[in-house]
């Protein structure tokens, strides 16, 4: 198909939000399907998190760090020129790009760093695609005096050189992963192997809403600050809730964070933009909701792009952070229930949005976030004047400038 965004509306259902039928499950998705060597570590993480999540001192320390160190609350910004150019629907931006380290990833990294300290462990590991979670993990490791190793696919090391140096500058060891396609899936594989060997001394800070229970819940809870803030800010600034909320979705941490502020608001339509890549053929995209099937990968049951025999397929996206063959289990539930409409956005449309947002608003968005703007533009035209579209600007695009320049054929890059 030739359109840049295409809908996968799912099965109609109520808007009651997430249903936890069993601990660690969201409807039929979730669970902890991990090697026996990791079950004890997963149990430890769950027990410590359950003990601390409602602890007043833990919450106070997290709020203080989030404010004084990370810069929360992040701003809500009205985009006047996008509003005018796109037909009159008001465009509002939740500015996670203004956080310390340049993305939403610091929210989860800070929370899990506190869990690491509480468990008495001295080393953290992380996987990263675009490098933003790697930078956030390296940052909190420096802040708390922890050893840090970050696994990053060889292809992502190439296209995210700036973030690689940032991680090394912060004291982290960056390990390029050469297996598979050298992208996020392969980096996650290696991080899992490391954790299996070093569970006694190491905590794995999973960066997205993926992996075995309790990680999808933990990441969701630490990222839900985005949606809670955005809801309050929209009511304060406009006197009303947005008509539509849009966020990009790879594994889905920024999206699940902002969605959770609005899941129970029936008037708010929620949209996820996933990686449409080069096209609809197997291996040319990372649109896990559109083309995925129910399966098991990286410790959880969710929707994955796979062969008929269950083997996970290689995927593609111009955006390293969306270059993953699956989606978090809570997103899979929201897709199947119909509460969230996930639509795929092609590489070329995301590249065009990257440039358009830069020119019209003086904001260079991450390539991941650029996928959201493509969908927001379409929704603005559909909804028209008087409507309000809220976009999660999950990260800044400094990291992508050289790669985009090369893709656009600019000499000297």
Image (spheres, rainbow, N blue to C red):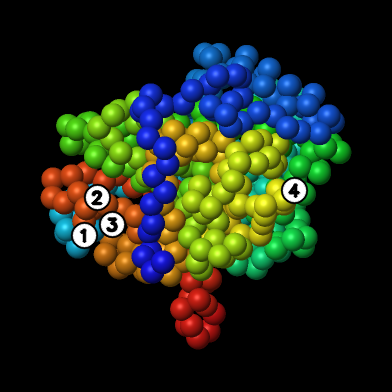
Q: Position of residue 38 (x, y in %)?
A: 80, 31
Q: Position of residue 335 (x, y in %)?
A: 46, 39
- Return the residue at label 3: 378
Q: Are marks 3 and 2 in contact (CB under 8 Å)?
A: no
Taking the spot 60% from the left edge, 19% from the top edge, the residue there is 22
**Nearest to the observer: residue 121 or residue 83:** 83
- Return the residue at label 4: 189
Q: Which structural element holds mark 4? A: helix
Taking the spot 21% from the left edge, 44% from the top edge, the residue there is 388
The C terminus lies in quadrant: bottom right
Q: Give the spatial CA distance, label 4 vs label 1.
A: 41 Å
Q: Is 233 drawn above or below residue 19 in the view shown? A: below
Mark in the foreground, 3 or 1: 3
- Return the residue at label 2: 91
Could you tell me if residue 97 is visible in this image? no
How many C-alpha atoms fall within 10 Å of the one at disc 2: few (<14), some, or many (≥20)?
Answer: many
Q: Position of residue 289 (x, y in %)?
A: 50, 47
Could you tell me if residue 327 is visible in this image? yes
Q: Is 179 drawn above or below residue 150 in the view shown? A: below
Dot placed on the residue nearer the N-terminal end, 3 or 4: 4
Taking the spot 36% from the left edge, 27% from the top edge, the residue there is 14
Left-right relation of 323 to 102: right
How many C-alpha atoms fall within 10 Å of the one at disc 1: few (<14), some, or many (≥20)?
Answer: some
Q: Which structural element holds mark 3? A: helix
Q: Which structural element holds mark 1? A: loop
Residue at the limit of the structure toward the front, as seen here: 308
Dot placed on the residue nearer the N-terminal end, 4 or 1: 1
Mark in the foreground, 3 or 4: 3
């Amino acid at each position: 198909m030739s359109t840049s965004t295409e809908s996968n509306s799912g099965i109609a259902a109520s808007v009651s939000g997430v249903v936890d039928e069993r601990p660690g499950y969201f409807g039929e998705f979730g669970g902890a399907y991990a090697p026996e060597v990791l079950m004890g570590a997963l149990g430890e993480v769950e027990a410590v998190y359950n003990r601390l999540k409602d602890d007043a001192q833990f919450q106070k320390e997290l709020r203080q760090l989030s404010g004084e160190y990370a810069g929360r609350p992040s701003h809500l910004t009205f985009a006047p020129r996008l509003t005018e150019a796109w037909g009159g629907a008001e465009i509002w931006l939740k500015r996670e790009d203004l956080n310390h380290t340049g993305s939403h990833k610091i929210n989860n990294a800070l929370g899990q760093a506190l869990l690491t300290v509480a468990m008495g462990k001295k080393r953290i590991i992380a996987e990263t695609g675009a490098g933003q979670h790697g930078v956030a993990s390296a940052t909190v490791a420096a802040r708390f005096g922890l050893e840090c190793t970050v696994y990053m696919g060889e292809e992502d090391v190439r296209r995210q050189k700036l973030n690689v140096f940032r991680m090394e500058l912060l004291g982290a060891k960056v390990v390029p992963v050469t297996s598979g396609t050298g992208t996020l899936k392969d980096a996650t594989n290696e991080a899992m192997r490391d954790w299996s060997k070093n569970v006694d001394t190491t905590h794995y800070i999973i960066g997205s809403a993926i992996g075995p229970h309790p990680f999808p819940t933990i990441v969701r809870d630490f990222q839900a600050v985005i949606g809670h803030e955005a809801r309050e800010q929209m009511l304060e600034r406009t006197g009303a809730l947005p008509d539509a909320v849009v966020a990009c979705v790879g594994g889905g941490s920024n999206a699940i964070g902002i969605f959770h502020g609005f899941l129970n608001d029936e008037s708010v339509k929620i949209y996820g933009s996933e990686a449409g890549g080069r096209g609809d053929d197997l291996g040319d995209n990372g649109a896990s909701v559109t083309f995925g099937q129910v399966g098991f990968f990286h410790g959880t049951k969710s929707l994955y792009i796979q062969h008929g025999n269950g083997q996970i397929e290689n995927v593609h996206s111009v955006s390293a952070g969306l270059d993953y063959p699956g989606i978090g289990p809570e997103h899979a539930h929201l897709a199947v229930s119909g509460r969230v409409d996930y639509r795929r956005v092609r590489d070329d449309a995301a590249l065009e949005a990257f440039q358009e947002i830069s020119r019209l608003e003086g904001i260079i968005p991450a390539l991941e976030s650029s996928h959201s703007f493509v969908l927001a533009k379409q929704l603005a035209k559909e909804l028209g004047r008087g409507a309000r579209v809220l976009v999660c600007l999950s990260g800044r695009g400094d990291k992508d400038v050289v790669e985009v320049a090369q893709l656009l054929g600019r000499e000297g890059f």
